[in-house]
Image: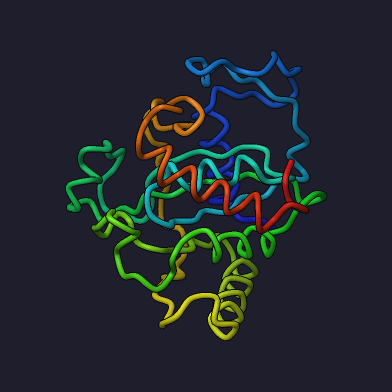
Amino acid sequence: MRNNLLYSCITLTLLALGCSSGLKNSGKPGPNDTNQLVLQMDTSKLDTAVLAGGCFWCLDAVYRQMKGIELVTAGYSNGSTQNPTYEQVCSGTTGHAEVVSIVYDTSKTSYADILEVFWRIHNPTTLNRQGNDIGTQYRSGIYYMNETQKELALKSKAAAEESHLWEGKFVTEIQALHNYFPAEDYHQDYYTNNPGNSYCVYVVGEKVEKFKKLFRDKLK
């Protein structure tokens, strides 16, 4: 049985994107009206994964391309500050990691599939760092909501490390999800909404293309 935290995370994600289950799709949102997105979803088939792997713009962009993913929301998790701002998180004083909450349809994809992608699209061997992004907010992490997710995360990490996907010891933390706060509106779907941004072109875009190349069978 799924716990209350899982349902809370799904609810926060839906609210962050201005969604309401049971209503018809109002159409594809434009670049500035993400909060107007309304989807029809069977919540009995939904589950949530919360992951940290550097700048949340990267994970956000990649998982939006993946089959079975219903919603992706950039946010902040496992810190001490309530309702933190981006500036506060970037200061490194809140304890929060930049994360994405991934709501997925369990009839179309799985937690294991999501983790398989996770290990390949970020470097899990660099402590508190992804490329030039340095700080505890950029740490690698998997934040589980029940014992099943915890066991799958531990097994997945061990298998990925043993397969030598990356040279070096994996430093990804696997911890219970203590809290989750959606990031500001302008961080949502940042890659799509800011195509000319140099970070999007050279960093986020590279990860998106890597995903498309490695996981063609998982593309929407």
Give the residue at x 25% y 47%.
81
Question: Would you place residue 102 above or below residue 117 in this image?
Answer: above
Q: Quadrant of the C terminus?
A: top right
Question: Would you place residue 192 above or below residue 213 in this image?
Answer: above
Left or right: 206 in relation to 86? right
> Residue 210 is drawn in which quadrant?
bottom right
The image position of residue 92, as x and y in percent, is 20, 53
> Residue 162 is drawn in which quadrant?
bottom right
Coloration mode:
rainbow
The image position of residue 164, as x and y in percent, is 54, 82
Left or right: 9 in relation to 184? right
The image position of residue 179, as x and y in percent, is 41, 51
Give the residue at x 42% y 38%.
200
Give the residue at x 38% y 54%.
54
Q: Nearer the viewer, residue 196 or 49?
A: 196
Q: Nearer the viewer, residue 201 or 182?
A: 201
The residue positioned farthest toward the bottom in the image shown: 162
Left or right: 112 in relation to 119? right
The residue positioned farthest toward the right in the image shown: 107
Give the residue at x 69% y 15%.
27
In the rendered picture of this protein, how many numbered marks are placed on residues? 0
Left or right: 4 in relation to 24? left
Q: Quadrant of the N terminus?
A: bottom right
> Residue 24 is drawn in which quadrant?
top right
The image position of residue 25, as x and y in percent, is 73, 18
Question: Would you place residue 119 above or below residue 110 in this image?
Answer: below
Q: Nearer the viewer, residue 38 or 203?
A: 203
